[in-house]
Image: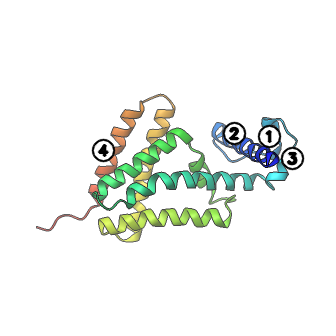
Amino acid sequence: MEATAVEGDRERQLLAAAEDMIREGRTLNLSLAEVADRIGVSRSLLYTYFDGVPAIVDELFLRHMDTLGARILPPLASGKTPYRDRASEAYAAYLDYLIESGPVLQLILRERHQDSPLGPESQRRFRQLVRRVASETCHALDLAPREAFVLIELTGGIPEALARLVRGGEIDRDTAHATCRRLVMASVDGFAPAPAR
């Protein structure tokens, strides 16, 4: 039992080091040797846990997707409130996630179109999350799927930019939340069908 706990601790340590390096360099270009040096172990020990950097990145992605999904899906799925309020809550949760976690998920997604480190399970879970958000958006605003994806892409940039400003100390968290709410609601209102006259 104790050996399993130590192995879990070592894996968490390895993932935390890789994540820190991705944040610092704002790139996925790192090597197992660099990660091993960061935590003071041999590179061969890292192969016990992961067969290379793509496997590390894939595991980080899965963990971030789990965290993000747990934060943004509950507000969207709560059908008791108007969609614009649910969307605002979901984007506020995304903003908090980005402030706390940094741009790791964004960096992984940015590089997924090149030499994607993401495995089939990661790709499936990402598509599943995006489709679920898009489906909620399509249904609530009577949009075609392509329009819903455009709206998600546009509004996703709002918390991403605001989180960068908060992490850089340029604005405070409350200002970021107020701005996010105002801009997301305006975006949703811009896509919402006009009331019949």
In the picture, the disc for residue 182 is: 4
Residue placed furthest toward the front = 1
* Front in this rendered view, residue 189 or 40: 40
Distance between the alpha carbons at the discs numbered 4 and 3? 49 Å
Q: Is residue 130 above or below residue 105?
A: below
Instruction: Nearest to the eye among marks 4 and 3: give it.
Output: 3
Residue 59 in the image, given as x and y percentages of width and height: 68, 54
Residue 187 in the image, given as x and y percentages of width and height: 32, 53
Disc 3 marks which residue? 45
Q: Is disc 4 surrounded by few (<14), some (14 to 19) or many (20+) residues within 10 Å?
A: few
Q: Earlier in the sequence, mark 4 or mark 3?
A: 3
- Name which residue lies at 62% across and 56% down: 62
Q: Left or right: 142 with respect to 28?
A: left
Q: Is disc 3 surrounded by few (<14), some (14 to 19) or many (20+) residues within 10 Å?
A: few
Residue 89 in the image, given as x and y percentages of width and height: 37, 49
Q: Left or right: 132 with respect to 112?
A: left
Q: Left or right: 11 with respect to 146?
A: right
* For the residues bearing labels 1 and 2, Cβ distance under 8 angstroms: yes
Using the rendered view, name the quadrant where residue 148 is placed.
Answer: bottom left
